[in-house]
Amino acid sequence: MRALIVEDEFLSRKILRSFLLPLFEIEVVVNGREAVEAFKLAHAENKPYDLILMDIMMPEVDGMEALARIRKMELEENLRPRAKVIMTTALDDPQTVIKTFYDGEASAYIVKPVVKDKLYEELQKLGLLHS
């Protein structure tokens, strides 16, 4: 399985990578613009991501905008299956959660700091981790 980590903070990238490394082939990008490019390239190579773990607050293009662009591409190009996207943020803000799920169609949402058990619990719910 393939995963894309989209995170602008170095330490967060390292931690998330260590959590996912036993389960996924991982690529890492540092902002939403790069995430959209990586998503396009993965589909062009016929190696789509099973999981995208995306920070919400990032420079250039934030996670919400990147997710909107990815969902638009999936719709317009009829890309199946849709990527499972877990949004991460330091904001424990109910409005952000609602916006992420309903507007952005995120698959899940985790408040930072990401804890391995919580991440694995979400992966299991999404059918990406088999107990």
Image: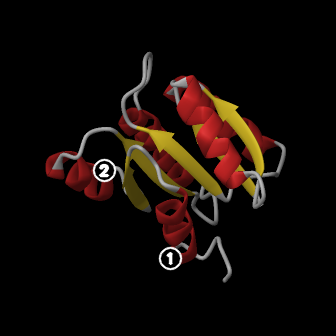
- The secondary element bearing badge 1 is classed as helix
The type of residue carrying mark 2 is Thr
Looking at the image, the residue that sits furthest to the bottom is 131
Q: Quadrant of the C terminus?
A: bottom right
What amino acid is labelled 1 in the image? Lys
Image spot of residue 105 (x, y percent): 37, 57
2 and 1 marks in contact (CB < 8 Å): no
Q: Is residue 111 left or right of residue 45?
A: left
Name the spot of residue 2 as percent of width and height, x first: 75, 54
Task: Say whether residue 96 is visible.
Answer: yes
Q: Which residue is mark 1?
A: 125
Decide which of 17, 103 is in the foreground and name it.
17
In-front residue for pair 113/43: 113
The residue drawn where x is 56% and y is 66% is 120
Q: Residue at x 49, y 42 (%)?
A: 54
- Of mark 2 and mark 1, the one earlier in the sequence is 2
Could you tell me how far apart the alpha carbons at marks 2 and 1 are, in whole angstroms?
A: 18 Å
